[in-house]
Image (cartoon, rainbow, N blue to C red):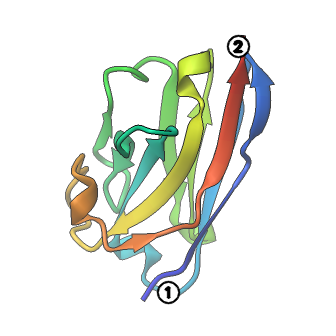
């Protein structure tokens, strides 16, 4: 089992940057693919980015390509989401999640078994 804790959210002006972190417990972090998802009020949870267990494959939603970067440090049991050029429409609760299929940068949130509690990101215009 994996426990995930997100941090790094906050309030930022449009055009600014934030880096989210997802710290994982347990010794099996390096076997999981990791994903970031977000959910705005009244909207469905949506895919943001994913990375395979060794970081060889990364996937992004079209809405964040070129602005967000997903990465991981298996030695630190941590995944990251660097968010640049933030827009008001990026405002949401951001969740990290772990997928036992470590070879897949999966976009479907139902394929992820473990979830963090979420961190709020608010982008003001």
User: Which image quarter: residue 79?
Assistant: bottom right
Q: Given the current orientation, which residue lies at the most extreme front position?
A: 42
Quadrant of the snapshot with the N terminus: bottom left
User: Which image quarter: residue 17?
Assistant: top right
Q: Position of residue 43 (x, y in %)?
A: 40, 38
Callout 1 secondary element = loop
| Residue 85 as seen in the image, left or right of residue 48 | right
Q: Are marks 1 and 2 in contact (CB under 8 Å)?
A: no
| Residue 89 as seen in the image, left or right of residue 9 | left
Callout 2 secondary element = loop
Q: Position of residue 61 (x, y in %)?
A: 32, 30
| Residue 41 as seen in the image, left or right of residue 11 | left
**Picture layout, residue 11 above or below residue 27:** above
Q: Position of residue 122 (x, y in %)?
A: 70, 32
Q: Position of residue 28 (x, y in %)?
A: 42, 83
Q: Nearer the viewer, mark 1 or mark 2?
A: 2
Label 1 belongs to which residue?
27
Crowding near the residue tagged with mark 1, few <14, some 14–19, many ≥20 C-alpha atoms within 10 Å: few
* Residue drawn at x 51%, y 28% as measured from the top left: 68
User: Which image quarter: residue 48?
Assistant: top left
* Residue drawn at x 67%, y 46% as measured from the top left: 120
Sequence order check, earlier mark of 1 and 2 = 2
Q: CA distance from mark 1 to mark 2?
A: 38 Å
Of residues 10 and 106, which is closer to you in this image? 10
Crowding near the residue tagged with mark 2, few <14, some 14–19, many ≥20 C-alpha atoms within 10 Å: some
Label 2 belongs to which residue?
14
**Picture layout, residue 9 above or below residue 65:** below
Tally the marks: 2
**Picture layout, residue 121 above or below residue 3:** above
């Amino acid at each position: 089992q994996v426990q995930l804790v997100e941090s790094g959210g906050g309030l930022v002006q449009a055009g600014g940057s934030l880096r989210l972190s997802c710290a994982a417990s347990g010794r099996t972090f390096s076997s999981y693919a990791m994903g970031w998802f977000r959910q705005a009020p009244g909207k469905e949870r949506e895919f943001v980015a994913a990375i395979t267990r060794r970081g060889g494959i990364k996937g992004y939603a079209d809405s964040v390509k070129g602005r967000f970067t997903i990465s991981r440090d298996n030695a630190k049991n941590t995944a990251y989401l660097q968010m640049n050029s933030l827009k008001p429409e990026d405002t949401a609760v951001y969740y990290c999640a772990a997928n036992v299929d470590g070879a897949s940068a999966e976009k479907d949130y139902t394929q992820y078994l473990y979830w963090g509690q979420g961190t709020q990101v608010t982008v003001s215009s």
